[in-house]
Amino acid sequence: MSTAAISFGSRLASRARRNPLAAVGIVFSLIFVIFAVFAPWIAPQDPASIHLATRLQPPSHAHWFGTDELGRDILSRIIYGARISMLVGSSVVAASLGLGLIIGSVAGYYGGAIDRFVNVILMNAFMSFPGILLAIAFVAFRGPGIFNLVLALSLGGWVGYARLVRGQVLAAREREFVEAARALGAGDVRIIVHHILPNIIQPVIVQAAIGMAGAILAEATMSFLGLGVPPPTASWGTMLNDGRAHLFDAPHLVWFPAAAVMLAVLSFNFIGDALRDYLDPRSRIEAGI
């Protein structure tokens, strides 16, 4: 093993000891990503295969997490459910972040009437309604499906990013490097993209990591209400909805998908907290990083 690899491993172990929750979050998030990408090769059985003769079996050697009311293997469905959660979560964060960056940057950079319209009217109008209710209404109108679900959850998700970016741009647009770029004849788009956004991206990254946890939880909520991906596609929220009728006679139908949702949400929250501490210069100085 090379000296560089040994040095990198030592630094990685040292940071893991400083923030064990971040290490746990990274490990579990990587596990869920691996499940999502390699689900067809990892899942022991077909998640949609029905075997009524083995329905509602408890965890065993043949079925590690047991079977559901149709005899489908719960472990396989959880592995395939990670694909839906990671896909919807990352798509919602990407769409919300992109829209929030554009709207927040324009409002914060130009100010005036544009800022008043975006901040006072547009953002407050979206924030006056709970995001989950907007998503429910949108999917109920458009119909279930991954594309409609991503659009529905992005409909109100962009507001938090836009408000954060707007505040950061308002503070950065008066900085010396922005004035220097403007004096050299740089256009507004170039100033925003090449000078302002790289200097305000740190809190946005933290918000995106925490937003990933919220998007996964929102997808599970929508699927639990029957407004997510249509059956027989495996989804953690759908599994929770199917298992609530057997909560007392077969509680494993609820335990395992609930644990998957909890671990996924906690993992990205831990990562978001660790990124906030790492990207904050004061926290890095205090921690000696």
Image: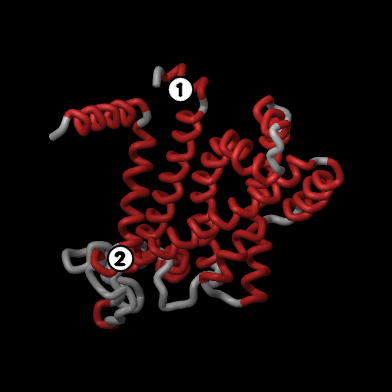
Scheme of image coloration:
secondary structure
Residue at the image position 60 percent from the left and 60 percent from the top: 153
- Residue furthest front in the image: 184
Could you tell me residue 91's position as x and y percent? 51, 59
Residue type at mark 1: give it. Answer: Arg
Q: Which one is nearer the viewer's eye here, 79 or 168?
A: 168
The mark tally for this picture is 2
Tell me which numbered mark, 1 or 2, is placed earlier along the sequence. 2
Q: Which residue is mark 2?
A: 39
**Quick check: 103 left or right of 125?**
left
Does 38 appear above or below 162?
below
Does 12 appear above or below 32?
above
Q: Toward which corner of the image does residue 131 lie, by quadrant?
A: bottom right
Residue at the image position 15 percent from the left and 32 percent from the top: 2
Residue at the image position 69 percent from the left and 33 percent from the top: 184
Q: Which one is nearer the viewer's eye here, 259 or 28?
A: 28
> From this viewpoint, is residue 92 visible?
yes
Q: Which one is nearer the viewer's eye here, 35 or 1?
A: 1
Q: Which residue is mark 1?
A: 284
Q: Mark 1 Cα within 10 Å, few/some/many (few <14, many 20+)?
A: few
Q: Which one is nearer the viewer's eye here, 107 or 158?
A: 107
Residue type at mark 2: give it. Answer: Ala
Per the model, the C-alpha gap separating discs 1 and 2 is 38 Å
Query: Which quadrant does the N terminus fall into?
Result: top left
Could you tell me residue 164's position as x and y percent? 66, 40
**Quick check: 51 left or right of 233?**
left
